[in-house]
Image (spheres, rainbow, N blue to C red):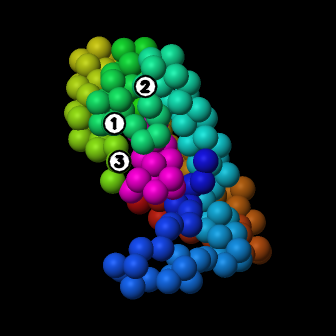
Amino acid sequence: MSVDGLEPRPVTEASGWTSADHRVREETREAIARAVPANTTRAYTRQWTMFTDWCRIEERTSLPATTETLTEYTACLCRAGYASASVEQAIAAVRVAHRSAGFPSRPDTRAADLVLADHRHALARAGRRPKKAKVLSIDEVRLMLEGCDTATLPGLRDRVVITVGRT
């Protein structure tokens, strides 16, 4: 799956574009690929594989997927108890795959987003809220600051970030 969305497109005479208008140099593609974190690529690839497997089992078309297919897939993930962040990532992965394949506005995610919103409400009613980071005490912050080597630029930067982040 391409995350960059820069696949060749057919030349259409009505637009006046030439094939050069749709070409991107290899070094530009590499810059785009480097900009996407490896973890994001892995996560989206995993989510896309899960989606295509589900589509195959459900006898649905994965590319291009319909709005109804994405909505039902979203509902399936919610019923299975996936965390809302995981479901949100799945929706994003499907959209990125479609954009990369030349379907920039498909599938529409509005209904899937509503299913996800309902899932978030259900999780909240059940007491399952997103985990929040623990607030550090002053003593814990002081210990972290003591560990910063202010003789080095990274240590000085870390000390500033910790100090500013605490205020």
Q: Which residues are magenta?
A: 88-104
The 10 Å Cα crowd at callout 3, few under 14, some 14 to 19, many 20 or more, is: some
* Pointers 1 and 2 in contact (C-beta within 8 Å): yes
Residue at image position (23%, 35%) is: 111
Give yes or no for residue 94 being in the magenta stretch: yes
In front here: 24 or 118?
Answer: 24
In front here: 81 or 25?
Answer: 25
In front here: 133 or 58?
Answer: 58
Residue at image position (61%, 68%) is: 32
Give yes or no for residue 132 being in the magenta stretch: no
Residue ID for mark 2: 60
- Which of the marked residues, 1 or 3, is nearer the chain's N terminus? 1
User: In the image, 38: left or right of 110?
Assistant: right
Res. 106 mark: 3
Res. 66 mark: 1
Residue kind at label 3, given as amino acid type = Arg
